[in-house]
Protein backbone atom coordinates (compact mmCIF):
# COMPACT_ATOMS: atom_id res chain seq x y z
CA UNK A 1 0.00 0.00 0.00
CA UNK A 2 1.28 3.47 -0.85
CA UNK A 3 0.53 6.70 0.89
CA UNK A 4 -0.48 9.99 -0.50
CA UNK A 5 2.23 12.61 -0.73
CA UNK A 6 -0.56 15.17 -0.66
CA UNK A 7 -1.60 14.15 2.88
CA UNK A 8 0.29 16.19 5.48
CA UNK A 9 1.24 14.24 8.60
CA UNK A 10 2.64 16.00 11.65
CA UNK A 11 5.18 14.14 13.79
CA UNK A 12 5.67 16.05 17.06
CA UNK A 13 8.27 14.90 19.61
CA UNK A 14 10.44 11.78 19.47
CA UNK A 15 9.41 8.85 17.27
CA UNK A 16 10.93 5.52 16.22
CA UNK A 17 13.32 5.97 13.26
CA UNK A 18 11.54 3.34 11.12
CA UNK A 19 8.20 5.14 11.53
CA UNK A 20 9.81 8.45 10.58
CA UNK A 21 11.32 6.94 7.43
CA UNK A 22 8.06 5.41 6.27
CA UNK A 23 6.04 8.54 6.99
CA UNK A 24 8.57 10.61 5.05
CA UNK A 25 8.43 8.15 2.12
CA UNK A 26 4.65 8.03 1.96
CA UNK A 27 3.32 11.39 3.13
CA UNK A 28 4.20 15.06 3.28
CA UNK A 29 5.82 14.87 6.72
CA UNK A 30 5.91 17.93 8.98
CA UNK A 31 8.60 17.09 11.52
CA UNK A 32 8.60 18.98 14.85
CA UNK A 33 11.10 17.10 16.97
CA UNK A 34 11.29 19.70 19.76
CA UNK A 35 7.53 20.02 20.13
CA UNK A 36 6.47 22.36 22.94
CA UNK A 37 2.89 22.92 21.87
CA UNK A 38 3.92 25.85 19.66
CA UNK A 39 1.52 27.19 17.04
CA UNK A 40 2.30 26.37 13.43
CA UNK A 41 1.54 28.92 10.66
CA UNK A 42 -2.23 28.83 10.03
CA UNK A 43 -1.92 27.49 6.47
CA UNK A 44 0.31 24.60 7.62
CA UNK A 45 -1.96 23.85 10.61
CA UNK A 46 -4.98 23.77 8.31
CA UNK A 47 -3.25 21.32 5.98
CA UNK A 48 -2.41 18.72 8.67
CA UNK A 49 -4.62 15.63 8.19
CA UNK A 50 -2.75 13.14 10.36
CA UNK A 51 -0.59 13.06 13.49
CA UNK A 52 1.73 10.22 14.44
CA UNK A 53 3.12 10.51 17.96
CA UNK A 54 4.03 8.97 21.27
CA UNK A 55 3.58 12.29 23.13
CA UNK A 56 0.29 13.28 24.82
CA UNK A 57 -2.33 14.84 22.53
CA UNK A 58 -4.96 16.86 24.36
CA UNK A 59 -8.09 18.61 23.10
CA UNK A 60 -6.31 21.96 22.59
CA UNK A 61 -3.68 20.34 20.44
CA UNK A 62 -6.31 18.59 18.32
CA UNK A 63 -8.20 21.86 17.94
CA UNK A 64 -5.11 23.58 16.57
CA UNK A 65 -5.63 21.40 13.46
CA UNK A 66 -9.09 22.00 11.97
CA UNK A 67 -8.75 19.32 9.28
CA UNK A 68 -7.20 16.60 11.43
CA UNK A 69 -8.59 13.16 10.53
CA UNK A 70 -6.40 10.63 12.34
CA UNK A 71 -4.04 10.35 15.31
CA UNK A 72 -1.80 7.26 15.09
CA UNK A 73 -0.59 6.75 18.66
CA UNK A 74 2.65 4.83 19.19
CA UNK A 75 1.77 2.43 22.03
CA UNK A 76 -1.03 0.15 23.12
CA UNK A 77 -2.07 2.27 26.11
CA UNK A 78 -3.62 5.49 24.83
CA UNK A 79 -4.50 7.31 28.05
CA UNK A 80 -2.31 10.23 26.90
CA UNK A 81 -4.70 10.95 24.01
CA UNK A 82 -8.02 12.66 24.74
CA UNK A 83 -10.09 10.07 22.85
CA UNK A 84 -13.39 11.53 24.06
CA UNK A 85 -12.59 14.80 22.34
CA UNK A 86 -11.27 13.01 19.26
CA UNK A 87 -14.50 11.01 18.98
CA UNK A 88 -16.61 14.16 19.36
CA UNK A 89 -14.72 15.78 16.50
CA UNK A 90 -14.83 12.66 14.30
CA UNK A 91 -11.07 12.12 14.54
CA UNK A 92 -9.88 8.51 14.30
CA UNK A 93 -7.41 7.37 16.98
CA UNK A 94 -5.34 4.23 16.48
CA UNK A 95 -2.94 2.36 18.78
CA UNK A 96 -0.58 -0.63 18.56
CA UNK A 97 -2.12 -3.68 20.27
CA UNK A 98 -0.95 -7.25 19.76
CA UNK A 99 2.60 -6.71 18.53
CA UNK A 100 4.06 -6.02 22.00
CA UNK A 101 1.98 -8.48 24.04
CA UNK A 102 4.61 -11.17 24.62
CA UNK A 103 7.43 -8.78 25.51
CA UNK A 104 5.23 -6.91 28.00
CA UNK A 105 3.98 -10.17 29.58
CA UNK A 106 7.58 -11.33 30.01
CA UNK A 107 8.33 -8.23 32.09
CA UNK A 108 5.51 -9.13 34.51
CA UNK A 109 7.16 -12.48 35.13
CA UNK A 110 10.61 -10.89 35.45
CA UNK A 111 9.29 -8.45 38.06
CA UNK A 112 7.50 -11.23 39.90
CA UNK A 113 10.61 -13.38 40.19
CA UNK A 114 12.68 -10.32 41.14
CA UNK A 115 10.20 -9.39 43.87
CA UNK A 116 9.76 -12.88 45.32
CA UNK A 117 13.32 -14.19 44.99
CA UNK A 118 14.99 -10.78 45.52
CA UNK A 119 17.23 -11.13 42.46
CA UNK A 120 18.31 -7.46 42.26
CA UNK A 121 19.36 -7.53 45.94
CA UNK A 122 21.10 -10.89 45.54
CA UNK A 123 23.04 -9.54 42.55
CA UNK A 124 24.02 -6.44 44.53
CA UNK A 125 25.25 -8.77 47.29
CA UNK A 126 27.58 -10.41 44.78
CA UNK A 127 28.74 -7.19 43.08
CA UNK A 128 29.40 -5.47 46.40
CA UNK A 129 31.70 -8.33 47.46
CA UNK A 130 29.47 -9.58 50.27
CA UNK A 131 29.34 -13.12 48.86
CA UNK A 132 33.11 -13.31 49.22
CA UNK A 133 33.28 -11.43 52.51
CA UNK A 134 30.13 -12.61 54.32
CA UNK A 135 29.05 -15.78 52.55
CA UNK A 136 25.82 -16.82 50.90
CA UNK A 137 22.96 -14.38 50.31
CA UNK A 138 20.31 -14.90 53.03
CA UNK A 139 17.51 -17.34 52.23
CA UNK A 140 14.45 -15.57 50.82
CA UNK A 141 11.36 -15.68 52.99
CA UNK A 142 9.16 -16.24 49.96
CA UNK A 143 8.84 -18.58 47.03
CA UNK A 144 6.76 -18.68 43.86
CA UNK A 145 5.55 -22.13 44.81
CA UNK A 146 1.95 -22.23 45.99
CA UNK A 147 1.26 -18.59 45.09
CA UNK A 148 -2.22 -17.51 44.11
CA UNK A 149 -2.18 -14.84 41.44
CA UNK A 150 -4.91 -12.35 40.66
CA UNK A 151 -4.71 -10.51 37.35
CA UNK A 152 -6.38 -7.10 37.15
CA UNK A 153 -7.16 -6.50 33.46
CA UNK A 154 -7.69 -9.63 31.38
CA UNK A 155 -6.97 -8.35 27.88
CA UNK A 156 -4.31 -9.62 25.50
CA UNK A 157 -1.44 -8.94 27.90
CA UNK A 158 -3.34 -10.30 30.92
CA UNK A 159 -4.00 -13.55 29.05
CA UNK A 160 -0.33 -13.81 28.06
CA UNK A 161 0.71 -13.29 31.70
CA UNK A 162 -1.78 -15.98 32.78
CA UNK A 163 -0.35 -18.42 30.24
CA UNK A 164 3.13 -17.92 31.70
CA UNK A 165 1.92 -18.23 35.33
CA UNK A 166 0.20 -21.49 34.46
CA UNK A 167 3.54 -22.95 33.44
CA UNK A 168 4.84 -22.09 36.94
CA UNK A 169 1.94 -23.99 38.56
CA UNK A 170 0.55 -20.75 40.04
CA UNK A 171 -3.23 -20.56 40.46
CA UNK A 172 -4.94 -17.77 38.51
CA UNK A 173 -7.97 -15.59 39.10
CA UNK A 174 -8.88 -12.24 37.58
CA UNK A 175 -10.89 -9.07 37.80
CA UNK A 176 -11.95 -7.22 34.70
CA UNK A 177 -14.69 -4.75 33.77
CA UNK A 178 -16.58 -7.76 32.41
CA UNK A 179 -16.13 -11.51 32.60
CA UNK A 180 -14.06 -12.57 29.57
CA UNK A 181 -15.84 -14.97 27.23
CA UNK A 182 -14.10 -18.33 26.88
CA UNK A 183 -11.70 -17.76 29.82
CA UNK A 184 -12.13 -20.25 32.63
CA UNK A 185 -9.94 -18.63 35.31
CA UNK A 186 -11.98 -17.63 38.40
CA UNK A 187 -13.62 -14.26 37.81
CA UNK A 188 -14.07 -11.74 40.65
CA UNK A 189 -16.53 -8.93 39.96
CA UNK A 190 -14.65 -6.55 42.30
CA UNK A 191 -10.97 -5.70 42.67
CA UNK A 192 -11.17 -5.93 46.46
CA UNK A 193 -12.75 -9.39 46.19
CA UNK A 194 -9.86 -10.48 43.98
CA UNK A 195 -7.26 -9.00 46.37
CA UNK A 196 -8.84 -10.87 49.30
CA UNK A 197 -8.68 -14.16 47.41
CA UNK A 198 -5.04 -14.01 46.25
CA UNK A 199 -1.56 -13.19 47.54
CA UNK A 200 -0.08 -11.92 44.27
CA UNK A 201 -1.82 -9.07 42.46
CA UNK A 202 -0.65 -8.35 38.92
CA UNK A 203 -2.10 -5.21 37.36
CA UNK A 204 -2.29 -4.92 33.61
CA UNK A 205 -5.10 -2.38 33.83
CA UNK A 206 -5.22 0.68 31.57
CA UNK A 207 -5.50 4.20 32.93
CA UNK A 208 -9.09 5.42 32.62
CA UNK A 209 -11.42 7.56 34.72
CA UNK A 210 -12.78 4.31 36.23
CA UNK A 211 -9.35 2.91 37.20
CA UNK A 212 -7.79 6.10 38.63
CA UNK A 213 -6.04 5.17 41.94
CA UNK A 214 -8.34 2.16 42.48
CA UNK A 215 -5.38 0.13 43.77
CA UNK A 216 -5.22 1.73 47.19
CA UNK A 217 -4.71 1.02 50.92
CA UNK A 218 -7.86 -1.15 51.07
CA UNK A 219 -6.55 -3.36 48.27
CA UNK A 220 -3.11 -3.69 49.92
CA UNK A 221 -4.75 -4.56 53.27
CA UNK A 222 -6.74 -7.26 51.51
CA UNK A 223 -3.63 -8.64 49.80
CA UNK A 224 -1.94 -9.06 53.17
CA UNK A 225 1.58 -9.41 54.59
CA UNK A 226 2.62 -12.18 52.19
CA UNK A 227 1.34 -10.05 49.32
CA UNK A 228 3.26 -9.20 46.19
CA UNK A 229 2.06 -6.40 43.92
CA UNK A 230 3.20 -6.21 40.29
CA UNK A 231 2.27 -3.36 37.95
CA UNK A 232 2.87 -3.40 34.20
CA UNK A 233 -0.33 -1.51 33.31
CA UNK A 234 -0.33 2.16 34.22
CA UNK A 235 0.95 3.97 37.31
CA UNK A 236 -2.14 6.17 37.62
CA UNK A 237 -4.24 3.13 38.58
CA UNK A 238 -2.36 3.04 41.90
CA UNK A 239 -2.48 5.36 44.89
CA UNK A 240 1.31 5.58 44.97
CA UNK A 241 1.42 7.05 48.50
CA UNK A 242 -0.70 4.15 49.78
CA UNK A 243 1.64 1.71 48.05
CA UNK A 244 4.72 3.31 49.63
CA UNK A 245 3.10 3.16 53.08
CA UNK A 246 2.04 -0.46 52.54
CA UNK A 247 5.63 -1.41 51.70
CA UNK A 248 7.15 0.68 54.51
CA UNK A 249 4.81 -0.85 57.10
CA UNK A 250 4.91 -4.46 55.88
CA UNK A 251 1.22 -4.39 54.94
CA UNK A 252 2.40 -6.22 51.80
CA UNK A 253 5.73 -7.97 51.32
CA UNK A 254 7.10 -6.55 48.07
CA UNK A 255 6.30 -4.88 44.76
CA UNK A 256 7.61 -5.02 41.21
CA UNK A 257 6.82 -1.94 39.13
CA UNK A 258 7.40 -0.98 35.51
CA UNK A 259 5.00 1.98 35.57
CA UNK A 260 4.56 4.96 37.91
CA UNK A 261 2.18 7.79 38.66
CA UNK A 262 4.33 10.62 37.21
CA UNK A 263 6.93 9.09 34.89
CA UNK A 264 9.88 9.51 34.79
CA UNK A 265 9.81 11.05 38.28
CA UNK A 266 9.65 8.71 41.27
CA UNK A 267 9.37 9.84 44.89
CA UNK A 268 12.54 9.28 46.91
CA UNK A 269 10.51 7.20 49.39
CA UNK A 270 9.83 4.65 46.66
CA UNK A 271 13.44 4.62 45.46
CA UNK A 272 14.56 4.03 49.06
CA UNK A 273 12.43 0.91 49.54
CA UNK A 274 14.48 -2.31 49.36
CA UNK A 275 11.30 -4.33 48.87
CA UNK A 276 10.41 -2.52 45.63
CA UNK A 277 11.94 -3.72 42.38
CA UNK A 278 11.70 -0.89 39.86
CA UNK A 279 12.05 -0.68 36.08
CA UNK A 280 11.96 2.42 33.84
CA UNK A 281 8.80 1.47 31.84
CA UNK A 282 10.53 -1.09 29.63
CA UNK A 283 7.53 -3.38 28.97
CA UNK A 284 7.66 -3.08 25.19
CA UNK A 285 11.24 -1.83 25.01
CA UNK A 286 12.76 -4.44 22.71
CA UNK A 287 13.96 -3.64 19.20
CA UNK A 288 11.53 -6.27 17.94
CA UNK A 289 8.40 -4.86 19.61
CA UNK A 290 9.26 -1.24 18.92
CA UNK A 291 9.86 -1.93 15.22
CA UNK A 292 6.53 -3.76 14.98
CA UNK A 293 4.82 -0.86 16.79
CA UNK A 294 6.40 1.62 14.36
CA UNK A 295 5.14 -0.45 11.41
CA UNK A 296 1.63 -0.70 12.82
CA UNK A 297 1.45 3.05 13.44
CA UNK A 298 2.33 3.81 9.84
CA UNK A 299 0.12 0.99 8.48
CA UNK A 300 -2.79 2.73 10.19
CA UNK A 301 -2.00 6.01 8.40
CA UNK A 302 -1.53 4.23 5.05
CA UNK A 303 -4.78 2.32 5.37
CA UNK A 304 -6.68 5.43 6.45
CA UNK A 305 -5.53 7.62 3.60
CA UNK A 306 -5.64 4.88 0.91
CA UNK A 307 -8.74 2.94 1.93
CA UNK A 308 -10.56 5.12 4.43
CA UNK A 309 -10.27 2.70 7.35
CA UNK A 310 -7.89 2.15 10.24
CA UNK A 311 -6.17 -1.18 11.01
CA UNK A 312 -6.23 -0.94 14.82
CA UNK A 313 -8.67 1.77 15.89
CA UNK A 314 -9.21 2.33 19.61
CA UNK A 315 -12.73 1.19 20.58
CA UNK A 316 -13.90 4.77 21.27
CA UNK A 317 -13.36 5.83 17.64
CA UNK A 318 -13.82 2.49 15.84
CA UNK A 319 -17.13 3.71 14.37
CA UNK A 320 -15.59 6.74 12.66
CA UNK A 321 -15.37 6.64 8.89
CA UNK A 322 -12.98 8.61 6.72
CA UNK A 323 -14.66 11.54 4.97
CA UNK A 324 -13.84 9.99 1.58
CA UNK A 325 -15.55 6.73 2.62
CA UNK A 326 -18.77 8.44 3.82
CA UNK A 327 -21.71 8.91 1.50
CA UNK A 328 -22.04 12.70 1.18
CA UNK A 329 -24.01 14.25 4.01
CA UNK A 330 -23.53 11.26 6.35
CA UNK A 331 -22.04 12.35 9.66
CA UNK A 332 -18.86 10.67 11.01
C1 LIG B 1 2.29 0.80 25.86
O1 LIG B 1 2.53 0.67 24.65
O2 LIG B 1 1.29 1.36 26.26
C2 LIG B 1 3.25 0.23 26.84
O3 LIG B 1 3.06 0.73 28.10
C3 LIG B 1 4.67 0.46 26.40
O4 LIG B 1 5.56 -0.25 27.21
Image (cartoon, helix red, strand yellow):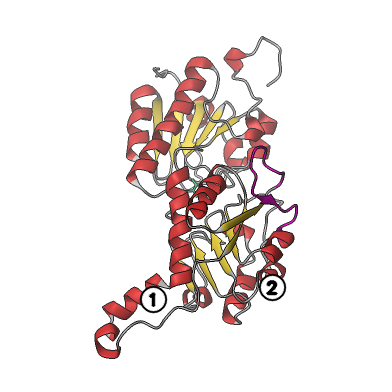
- Say which residue appears at 70% left-offset and 32% top-offset: 88
User: Which is more toward the observer, 78 or 170?
Assistant: 170
Residue ranking furthest to the bottom: 134
206 within the magenta span: no
Task: Name the N-terminal-most of marks 1 and 2.
Answer: 1
Q: Quadrant of residue 247?
A: bottom right
- Say which residue appears at 55% left-offset and 18% top-offset: 308
Image x and y of residue 57, in percent: 56, 43
> Horizontal placement of 40 versus 91: left or right?
left
**Mark 1 surroundings: few (<14), some (14-19) or many (≥20) residues within 10 A:** some
Tell how many labels. Answer: 2
Q: Which residue is mark 1?
A: 121
> Horizontal placement of 102 versus 131: left or right?
right
Image x and y of residue 197, in percent: 69, 63
User: Which is more toward the observer, 210 or 176?
Assistant: 176
Q: Which mark is residue 271?
A: none
SS for dot 1: helix
In this view, 25 is above or below 180: above
In this view, 211 is above or below 240: above
**Where's the N terminus, which quadrant?**
top left
Amino acid sequence: MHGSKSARVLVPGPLHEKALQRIDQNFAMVRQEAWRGQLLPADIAASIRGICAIIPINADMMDAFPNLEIIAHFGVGYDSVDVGHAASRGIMVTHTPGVLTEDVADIAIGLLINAVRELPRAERWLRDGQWASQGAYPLTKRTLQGRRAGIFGMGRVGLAVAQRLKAFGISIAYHNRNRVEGVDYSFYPTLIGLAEAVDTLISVAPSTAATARVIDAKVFDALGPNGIFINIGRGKTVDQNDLIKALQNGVIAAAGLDVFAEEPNLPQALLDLPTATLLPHVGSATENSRQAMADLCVDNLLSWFAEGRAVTAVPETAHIKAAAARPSGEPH
